[in-house]
Image: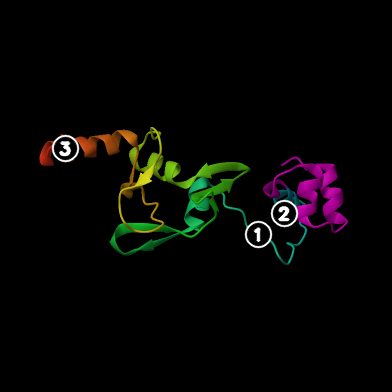
Amino acid sequence: MKIRDDIAELLRAGVPQIHICRQLHVAPLTVQRTREALGLPSPKTCRVLPATPEDAFAKYTRPIDGGHLQWTGPLKSRVPFFRHQGQHHYVRRVSFRWQYGRDPIGNVTPSCDVKGCVAGRCLQDRPMREHTESLYAAIFGGAE
C-alpha cells in the first residue's frame, strides 16, 4: 500500500480520523488502512467499516420468523438505505437485485405484511405487481 504523507503526518500528530477524512476528503477506510500500515494503534472509538455491500446490508438487518428480514438501519424519507464506500444504496433495490439477478423496474415494494421487511423474496417491482393484478383480474373478474 502506498502511504500518503499528508495522512501519515496527521495520524502521527494524533488528529482524530474523522477530522482527517473531512480535511483531506478521503474515505475512513483509507485512513484506517494507513494507520494499520504505519503500525499505529487503533483509536479508542474506532468504527470498523463493512468490507462489502453485503456486510453493510447485513449490519442493519435481523432475521425474523417466516424467512423475513427486518431493516433496523437508517431511513431516508422513510425508505431504507445504507452507505458503502461513499455510495448511497436503497436497500429494497439491492435486495431485489441479489434475489432475482436483475435490476428492478420501477419502485420496489414489499409483497408481505411484515413491517420493515427487506427480504428479497418478499419484494416485487412494477412488472411483478402488474402480473399479480392481471392474475387477480382473471380469477375474480376485472372492473366493469
Residue 44 on image: x %, y %:
73, 67
* Magenta-drawn stretch contains 26: yes
Quarter occupied by the C terminus:
top left
- What element does badge 3 sit on? helix
Q: Amino acid at mark 3?
A: Ala
Residue 49 relative to residue 54: left or right: right
Q: Nearer the viewer, mark 3 or mark 1?
A: 3
Give the spatial CA distance, label 1 vs label 2.
14 Å
- What element does badge 2 sit on? helix
Q: Is tag 3's residue or tag 1's residue first in the polypeptide sequence?
A: 1
Q: Amino acid at mark 2?
A: Glu
Q: Nearer the viewer, mark 3 or mark 2?
A: 3
**Extent of the magenta region:** 1-30
User: At 47% from the left edge and 55% from the top edge, which residue is drawn?
Assistant: 58
Q: Label 2 crowding class (10 Å Cα cut-off): few <14, some 14-19, many 20+?
A: few
- Name the one closer to the observer, 60 or 142: 142
Q: Label 3 crowding class (10 Å Cα cut-off): few <14, some 14-19, many 20+?
A: few
Residue indicated by mark 1: 47
Q: Report which quarter residue 131 is drawn in.
A: top left
User: How many numbered discs sit on the rendered protein?
Assistant: 3
Q: Label 1 crowding class (10 Å Cα cut-off): few <14, some 14-19, many 20+?
A: few
Q: Which mark is residue 36?
A: 2
Give the spatial CA distance, label 3 vs label 2.
61 Å
| Chosen colour scheme | rainbow
Residue 106 on image: x %, y %:
40, 34
- Name the one closer to the observer, 135 or 24: 135
Residue 77 relative to residue 118: left or right: right
Residue indicated by mark 3: 137
User: At 35% from the left edge and 43% from the top edge, which residue is drawn?
Assistant: 99
Above-or-below relation of 53 to 105: below
